[in-house]
Amino acid sequence: MKAENTAILDPVTGWLILALFSALWIFLGWLWGRRAKQLDEFMLAGRNVGLSLAVATAMATWVTSNTTMAAPQLALQLGIWGMVGYSLGAIGLFMFAPLAKRIRELMPHGYTSGDFIRLRFGKTTWRIFLMISLFYAFGWLISLGMAGGVLINALTGIPYTYGMSVILFICVLYTLLGGLRAVIGTDFVQTIIIVCGVIILAYLAIDKVGFEAIHAGVQKERPELLNLLMPAAIMFLFNNLLFGVGEIFHSNVWWSRAFAFRSGVGFKAYTIAGVMWLPIPIVAGFIALAAPALGLNVPAADMVGPLVAAKLLGFTGAVLIFIVVFSALASSLDSLLAATGDLITQDIYRQHLRPHADEKELRKAAMVIISLLGVVTWLLCLPRLTTLAELLYFTGAFVASTIWPIVAGLYWQRANRKGAALAMLLGTCVGLYTYFAIGFYVAALVGAAVSMLIVVISTLIWPQSFDWQTLRNEDPL
Amino acid sequence: MIASATFLAILVTLALILSIVTPVLLFTFFIRDLKQGTLW
């Protein structure tokens, strides 16, 4: 599909909005991040983030372009269960709430999820975990970068490469300016914009088309989307639940926040963020169901959200969804850049290459690594390889295989090293096999099931005694 | 089993109401943190 056929904003308007919001993010990033001179301030926002910013950052990071663009895509592919299934991603936030509390208590000096795996399960498991975690981080980064390019191209006709480049550059710049402080500060503003934008879009969709017309349109042209017993959609629902749990449990994006939130805030913040996130994919996904009623031809499924908004709401709708998705992209991209940068700085640069590096050197290294991450992501985003949801769910087997080793590692004193390593390896392999043999909607489900069996059985057969104090005493720096 | 228009309307309306509460709560928390000096 040519962008000229779908764009309802002219490129000049698109560039103006990009410039305006880019300037805002950079200014806010500088404003909130200017005190982040020390490594702790840069990487973990001083470990003293309060409830309001904590809730907003957990929510904004989980509301990604994948929520605002892939939720409509999944609604169009899997119907009602597609959007409800996507909203079950919130379960990951709920379930991480007690973990965040435990992580903060067990590791008051921790920096990354890698620190925990290394101290709890040893170096072999830690390296397997790092490979999974970094692979996922790049998958997510590429997915976000591509989403930026796709959205800008669909709505304004600005070439994919330019839009993707601008979004990446802006996020790298303000993350460099203030580290996690800049990320968390901008997340608050971005959350408000995203939620208000999605509410307005959904309300106008209901007002202009109406539930009856949308339902009749879907029933006439795509009746399978209303089928509450659609097998693939039901599998997707459970798969997405596990995918969300796996992503949150293993990713340093969430662990770095657990370390950064003030003591006693983590549990409340993740629980409230889960409640607030739950309805967003339903509201965002719903507008895709208006496509049949509007007689829209949607040749690329991942463009359905912007196309419906543009068709329904004209210029204002296009501007609004453009701002909403730009905010969603930025809020997740910046978090991922900062957290992946932390993981590489702490677990690769310091632990593998420069064990005696001081804080000053690590602060500089963190900035270089974030810049390089931006460049590598940009290179990988240049060819538009696959649709957004496919890329995202390819990584499902990887992340789901980490759920049980992490939970057992945090709560089960007898969980052992070999079992954790095997669970991650075999869970990933079998999950990937089912991804190709059956479909994207089962990879996480199978990966998590295999991983669980291995962790439970290996712990019962070869129990290991672990001293929790090992985690409390260790100051990674 | 096919979802009815009413089912769709209830699902989306509930989600919309829950979404509207979010910015209100966030601002409430923000002002409280600001007053207590517990923002960062």
Image: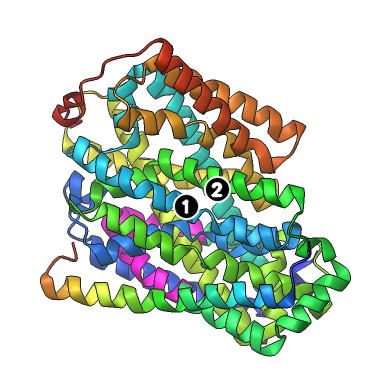
| Residue sitting at the far top | A462
Q: Chain of mark 1?
A: A
**Residue A136 versus residue A170: which sits nearer the camera?**
A136
**What residue lies at 59% left-to-right and 67% top-to-bottom?**
A282
Q: Amino acid at mark 1?
A: Ile
Where in the figure is residue A21, as x and y percent of width and height? 44, 73
Q: Amino acid at mark 2?
A: Leu
| Residue sitting at the far right | A220
Quarter location, residue A351? top left
Residues at discs 2 and 1 in contact (Cβ within 8 Å): yes
Residues in magenta, as a range:
A167-194
Where in the figure is residue A386, as x and y percent of width and height? 70, 47
Question: Residue A342 — which label?
Answer: none
Q: Is residue A28 magenta?
A: no
Q: Earlier in the sequence, mark 2 or mark 1?
A: 1
CA gap between label 2 and label 1 equals 7 Å
Question: In the drawing, does residue A109 fall left or right of residue A393?
Answer: left
The answer to whether one can see residue A423 in this image is yes
Q: Is residue A189 magenta?
A: yes
Residue with the mark numbered 1: A91
Indicate whether A16 appears above or below A461: below
Q: Residues within 10 Å of mark 1 (few under 14, many from 20)?
A: many
**Residue A409 versus residue A10: which sits nearer the camera?**
A409
Where in the figure is residue B15, as x and y percent of width and height? 53, 72
| Residue sitting at the far bottom | A207
